[in-house]
Amino acid sequence: MADTSATPSQHVRDGAPLDDSKEVHVSTSQPQAPITPKSGADAALNLLKETGGVRRPVDAETNKRLLRKIDLHIMPLICIVYFLQYIDKTAISYASVTGIIKDTGLHGNQFNWVASIFFFGQLAFEFPTIRLIQLFPLAKYVAVNVTIWGTVLASLAACKSYASLLACRFLLGAAEAAVVPAWVIFTSQWYTRNEQAFRVGIWFSVCGAAQMFGGYFAYGVANHVGSDPNAALKGWQIIFLFLGLLTALIGISFWFVMPDSPEFAGFLTTEEKTLHVERIRGNEQGIGSRTFKWDQFREALTDPMTWLYAFWIFAANIPNSIATSFGNILVKGMGYTSKESLLLVTPLGAYEIVALVGGTWIAMKTEQRLYACIAIHIPAIIGAILMATTNKVPALIGYYLSGGIPIGWTTILGLQASNVAGSTKKVTVSVIGTMAYTIGNIISPQTFQARDSPRYLPAKVSIVILYFLITCDLVLMRWLFVRRNRLRVEEKNARAEEWKLEENHEFLDQTDLVNREFRYAL
């Protein structure tokens, strides 16, 4: 990490923190007074207390070894659960072309509401999640939620009516409410700023893999079960049962395998835990505090960045039905059959993986997350125009190009992990973002009105407009970050003689606005 005695020009390039991933270096000062964690301070101080408060050097090789160990133990389970949360909530789309509409007697826009009610459940449970996610051990809380939503998803196979579908989809949304806030916290606990964008890109890109797997899985079910009129279970029932039971099993595993924080990581020795704390010192936010702080909650509500994040998430998710609930129906409207649509939606997932992993890797190497994101948004805008103005192959290509938009979601999640400090503020900003996501997704299916089928032109025109607006939002975000960094450098220069930092200030659970040493990643 950069020495805190460095000049401002060493800290900031074009307003952004320098890349410290090559070597994490901290000063080896003399032993200090024993650390006594302050009330409400970050849990990292508990680990530092074990070393007497001495800063320890973390050389490049040690940093690389620790990172590899963390990746092997943390990323697989994070990716698996995120894969399941995506495919589980979009399973309703596969059910729509494997008989659920006919078997449960849905008509008119009732399927739209079955798709939307999931997000009402998620929205209803977001504010309780702010407190519960801090009140209980993080991984254990997530494990319980994953197990519940797996059970609810399996229960959808028993639904016979519109009302029962609404009830189960609502509960499914409530159980999934904790995922995004929890994943933002996991990422900030385990990775340095420069590592976070790429790791968010990895775990978010599994949505593309889920889309591919879901399409092929549903296609197989439709062929082998849908063609058998004597089958005990319908195709959509098998989809819900298989995915639901698999998710519940993974949820139980999550309880035993995933540590609640680096403080309780059984795969790290005490020595490695303290080295990890030094590794992430440059994040200026530690590994988390379980104390709820009203001042941080209020700051989250008044910080303009909270609402810039929320606007992007809200506006980008209004068109989200093209990849979730209405993906197959939209492709059918381009001139393809139901079975063809199950296969033709899968390249969208492949392109999404390439765009997310490639884009976030470029962002990590260039330290320009927002520029990389904006660049990938441009083909998506072109794709939206193709969907609105053409049919068949050109429209399908445009549909695939829209798969680049989720890089904006990964960028926002990465920025929430690295650019929002203070445990309560981070959870609050993440929850507000998730609420924006749910509201956007509640609106999304309603833009695809039955009267507009099969082309759904009004919805496609709105997608073009929204994609342009969210790209402008990213430009505004970057301008504000650069401005804040520049003002802090000027403030530090002006107060050079009296600029003094409290020892271990990085772990006092201060917010990014309170901690004037904090620098925003771009």
Image (spheres, rainbow, N blue to C red):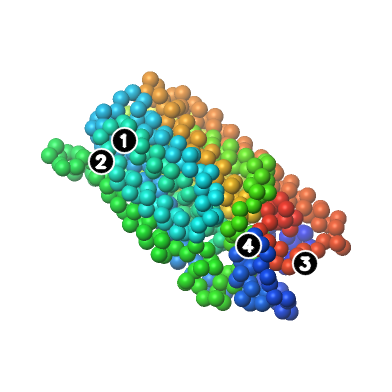
Query: What is the CA distance from the residue labelled 2 to the residue labelled 3?
Result: 64 Å
Marking on residue 42: 4
Q: Amino acid at mark 2?
A: Ala
Q: Position of residue 332 (x, y in %)?
A: 32, 31
Comes first in the chain, label 3 or label 1: 3
> Farthest residue toward the bottom?
30
Q: Secondary structure at mark 1?
A: helix
Q: Position of residue 182 (x, y in %)?
A: 51, 53
Residue beneath the point at 16% across and 42% down: 232
- Left or right of 440 in this view: 152: left
> Farthest residue toward the top?
451
- Left or right of 341 in this view: 415: right
Tell me the mark number nearer the camera, choosing from 3 and 1: 1
Position above or below: 115 against 485: above
Query: What is the CA distance from the residue labelled 4 to the residue labelled 1?
Result: 44 Å
Q: Position of residue 420 (x, y in %)?
A: 63, 51
